[in-house]
Image (cartoon, rainbow, N blue to C red):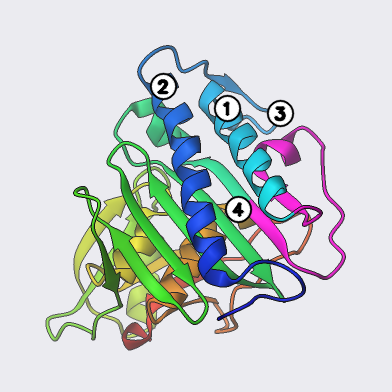
């Protein structure tokens, strides 16, 4: 049976338990989604809602029960100044409600993100879309799968590069197409189609073979990307910096450099 570093449970156990934790957080998110969202701004002027806090409380409790003593870097905990000490061992990265702007717009494109980080890389990634019930999971040695609306799981994998050109993902709220177009031209990449999506859904679209590449040249935090990267890498893809190095985690203040998420066929 696959195991993780140290005394943590097997990857299969972690994947199942994190699925349950994400689902419990999604219940809280949708409860609030149905009423007053409780929107306000954090110190950095980014929005936060009652759902962010309620979901994070559920996830923190679940992960502390699952892996006692393992540090958890979570978005709202960090915003409140509660920063865990990382000792070089495994830790969790959590975004309880990725795509808060999409949540406020009520367009359904928001996710719960949970990732286990070992040696700077995501080894388990869970991305759950509460509004649809769609779920994407990735884990080392287990591959990636997706749960459809009917509850059935199916394996997913990235696709070969389409002969007519790539399908590129872009952020629904943050894309600057002029910058993206210049980058695609400079890298001799032909884009035949664009897909806009919020939150970590862009990583998942590549992982399931509906898209090929997602360049991100704006600010992101580690909790925004780790779970999606875990899914994408387990599906055969990669996330690299602009100089081609793997995107890694555990670097306070937990801000990512610019990166490209892609199938390996889209290099």
- Lower sequence index among marks 1 and 3: 3
Q: Do the residues labelled 1 and 2 touch (CB within 8 Å)?
A: yes
Q: Which residue lies furthest to the left in this view?
A: 164
- Lower sequence index among marks 1 and 2: 2
Q: Do the residues labelled 4 and 3 touch (CB within 8 Å)?
A: no
The residue mark sitting in front, 1 or 3, is 1
- Whole-percent x, y for residue 150 in the image: 19, 49
Numbered disc 3: secondary structure: loop
The residue mark sitting in front, 2 or 4, is 2
- Whole-percent x, y for residue 8 in the image: 70, 67
C-alpha separation, residue under disc 4 versus residue under disc 1? 17 Å
Asked whether, in this view, residue 144 is left or right of residue 85, the answer is left
Q: Residue 31 carries which label?
A: 2
- Magenta range is 68-93
- Mark 2, residues whose alpha carbon is within 10 Å: few (<14), some, or many (≥20)? few
- Judging by the rendered image, the residue that carries numbered circle 1 is 54
**Toward the viewer: 10 or 155?**
10
Residue 217 part of the magenta-drawn span: no
Asked whether, in this view, residue 199 is left or right of residue 106, the answer is right
In the displayed structure, 137 sits above or below 262; it is: above
- Judging by the rendered image, the residue that carries numbered circle 4 is 223
In the displayed structure, 132 sits above or below 66; it is: above
Numbered disc 2: secondary structure: helix
**Toward the viewer: 229 or 70?**
70
Residue 82 part of the magenta-drawn span: yes
The image quarter containing residue 251 is bottom right
Residue 47 visible within the image? no
- Whole-percent x, y for residue 238 in the image: 46, 78
């Amino acid at each position: 049976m696959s195991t993780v570093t140290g005394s943590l449970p097997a990857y299969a156990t972690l994947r199942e338990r994190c699925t349950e934790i994400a689902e419990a957080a999604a219940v809280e998110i949708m409860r609030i989604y149905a009423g007053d969202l409780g929107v306000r701004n954090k110190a950095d002027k980014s929005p936060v809602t009652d759902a962010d806090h309620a979901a994070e409380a559920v996830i923190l409790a679940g992960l502390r029960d699952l892996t006692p003593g393992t540090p958890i870097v979570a978005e709202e905990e960090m915003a409140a100044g509660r920063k865990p000490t990382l000792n070089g061992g495994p830790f969790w990265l959590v975004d309880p409600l990725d795509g808060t702007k999409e949540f406020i717009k009520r367009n359904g494109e928001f996710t719960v993100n949970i990732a286990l980080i070992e040696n700077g890389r995501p080894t388990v990634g869970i991305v759950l879309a509460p509004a649809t019930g769609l779920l994407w999971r990735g884990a080392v040695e287990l591959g990636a799968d997706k749960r459809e609306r009917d509850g059935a799981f199916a394996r997913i994998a990235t696709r070969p590069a389409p002969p007519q050109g790539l399908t590129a993902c872009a952020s629904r709220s943050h894309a600057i197409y002029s910058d993206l177009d210049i980058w695609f031209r400079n890298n001799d990449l032909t884009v035949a189609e664009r897909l806009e999506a919020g939150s970590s859904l862009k990583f998942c679209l590549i992982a399931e073979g509906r898209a090929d590449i997602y360049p991100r040249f704006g600010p992101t935090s580690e909790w925004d990307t780790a779970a999606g990267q875990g899914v994408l890498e387990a599906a055969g893809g990669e996330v690299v910096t602009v100089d081609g190095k793997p995107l890694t985690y555990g670097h306070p203040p937990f801000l990512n450099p610019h990166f490209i998420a892609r199938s390996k066929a889209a290099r």
